[in-house]
Amino acid sequence: MKKRDLIQAVALHTDVDNKTAGKLVEGTIDVILATVAKGEIVNISGFAKFAKIKRPARMARNPATGEQIKVKAKTVAKITALKGFKDIALGAAPAPKLNTKRSAPAPTKAAPKKTAKKAAPKKAAPKKTAKKAAPRKAAKKRR
């Protein structure tokens, strides 16, 4: 599922338009990124934990030669799936039900029905045909 698909699914599930759902998804991602960039941990209960981890410098061993090498200190991003997410992903718990159909607005009784006028038939546009390219002549090989 790509971000566009996620936005459409959120819009259907929450019964809002795609533009609003897009703003909500983008806003959520922006808040998580900004908070983690500051060094704080974002813990979405039952889903995932996002953190910025500082790893100290250490001595490691090159597996090919066995030589000792020094690894520099670095900062890494870490995302940990929490128990609720793992249970659903692995089938231990049932997945939540999603609303897949947009609910139609309830008709109002106060507004009278309007009769639609039939539009005049439109003239069909002439079809454009694509020209095929002429076949290439085989080049003669010189020996």
Image: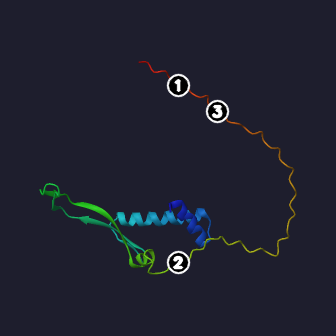
Query: What residue lies at 59% left-to-right and 67% top-to-bottom?
Result: 11
Closer to us: 129 or 75: 129
- Residue at far left of view: 67
Quadrant where the image shows the C terminus: top left
State the image coordinates of residue 122 (x, y, percent, origin top left): 83, 47
- Secondary structure under tag 1 reads loop
Gap between marks 2 and 3 measured at Cα: 53 Å
Name the quadrant containing residue 22: bottom right
Name the quadrant containing residue 90: bottom left
Which mark sits nearer the N-terminus, 3 or 1?
Answer: 3
Which mark sits nearer the N-terminus, 2 or 3?
Answer: 2
The correct choice, above or below, for 128 with respect to 54 in the image is above
Q: Is residue 90 left or right of residue 68?
A: right
State the image coordinates of residue 60 (x, y, percent, origin top left): 16, 61
- Residue at far bottom of view: 93
Q: Nearer the viewer, mark 1 or mark 2?
A: 1
* Residue at the disc numbered 2: 96
* Residue at the disc numbered 1: 138
Mark 1, other Cα within 10 Å: few <14 / some 14–19 / many ≥20: few
State the image coordinates of residue 108 (x, y, percent, origin top left): 78, 74
Gap between marks 3 and 1 measured at Cα: 18 Å
Q: Is residue 111 left or right of residue 77?
A: right
For badge 1, the amino acid type reads Ala
- Secondary structure under tag 3 reads loop
Q: Nearer the viewer, mark 2 or mark 3?
A: 3
Gap between marks 1 and 2 measured at Cα: 63 Å
For badge 2, the amino acid type reads Pro
Q: Which mark is residue 132?
A: 3
Mark 2, other Cα within 10 Å: few <14 / some 14–19 / many ≥20: few
State the image coordinates of residue 96 (x, y, percent, origin top left): 52, 78
